[in-house]
């Protein structure tokens, strides 16, 4: 099953077969597409790049050619994103240490908690990335405890978020300004 858009409820394409083309690493996919989809008459192509774990999924939607590139991430998307954006050891202006582990544990002065970076969110202010406190089973409280995080140059800015009402409000001034040390 190939799904190119989880959030907005994109079309699900069921791959029922694959056929090698005359080009190395290029395959035509035999795809079952729902009748309602604009991609019904499209040709689907899968390209495996020799030197990487990247693949391309090419098809037509209406009169537009769509190319989606995918890369392999290990061990999961959430761990990969956390490793890229947040995992590491930091220090604030007062010399206090802050740690974000690859497994989603945060150790701050006077506070330890599990966290998860929110990968798909709606209604958030533009340019906001969030992490959410979670318990040992990955569950969050209601309302969720959220922190906005933002990289500004080599500084990681962290803001406590007011999530108690019907909207998410990010403070203007960061609660923590951190610098990576590891």
Image: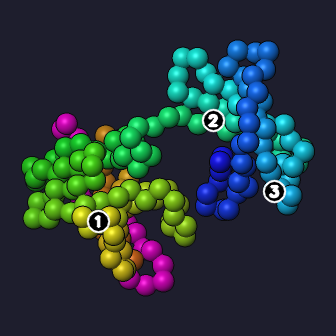
Q: Position of residue 148 (x, y in %)?
A: 37, 61
Q: Residues within 10 Å of mark 2 (few under 14, many from 20)?
A: few
Q: Nearer the viewer, residue 42 or 34?
A: 34
User: Is residue 84 shown left or right of residue 22?
Assistant: left
- SS for callout 3: loop
Q: Which residue is mark 2?
A: 69
User: Is residue 180 shown left or right of residue 143?
Assistant: left
Chief secondary structure of the magenta portion: loop
User: Is residue 72 shown left or right of residue 26?
Assistant: left
Q: Report how far apart the C-alphas of labels 2 and 1 lie in the structure.
A: 32 Å
Q: Between tags 2 and 1, which lies in front?
A: 1
Q: Which residue is mark 3?
A: 34
Q: Position of residue 36 (x, y in %)?
A: 85, 60
The residue sitting at the bottom extreme is 165
Q: Position of residue 65 (x, y in %)?
A: 82, 38
Q: Going 44% across and 46% down the picture, which residue do you hit?
A: 77
Q: Residues within 10 Å of mark 3 (few under 14, many from 20)?
A: few
Q: Between tags 3 and 2, which lies in front?
A: 3
Instruction: Report if residue 50 lies within the magenta region.
Output: no
- SS for callout 2: strand
Location of the C terminus (image quadrant): top left
Q: Which residue is mark 1?
A: 137
- SS for callout 1: loop
Provide the residue span drawn in magenta.
164-182
Give residue 115's mark.
Answer: none
């Amino acid at each position: 099953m190939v799904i190119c858009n989880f959030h907005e409820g994109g079309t699900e394409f069921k791959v029922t077969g694959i056929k090698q083309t005359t080009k190395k690493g290029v395959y035509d996919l035999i795809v079952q597409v729902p009748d309602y989809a604009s991609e019904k008459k499209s040709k689907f192509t899968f390209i495996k790049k020799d030197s990487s774990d990247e693949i391309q999924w090419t098809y037509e939607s209406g009169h537009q050619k769509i190319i989606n590139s995918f890369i392999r991430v290990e061990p999961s998307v959430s761990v990969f994103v956390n490793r890229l954006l947040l995992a590491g050891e930091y220090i604030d202006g007062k010399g206090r240490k802050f740690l974000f582990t690859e497994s989603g544990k945060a150790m701050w002065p006077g506070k330890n908690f599990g966290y998860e970076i929110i990968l798909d969110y709606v209604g958030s202010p533009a340019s906001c990335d969030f992490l959410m406190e979670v318990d040992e089973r990955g569950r969050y409280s209601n309302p969720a405890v959220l922190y906005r995080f933002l990289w500004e140059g080599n500084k990681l800015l962290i803001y406590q978020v007011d999530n108690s009402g019907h909207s998410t409000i990010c403070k203007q001034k960061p609660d923590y300004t951190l610098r990576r040390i590891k």
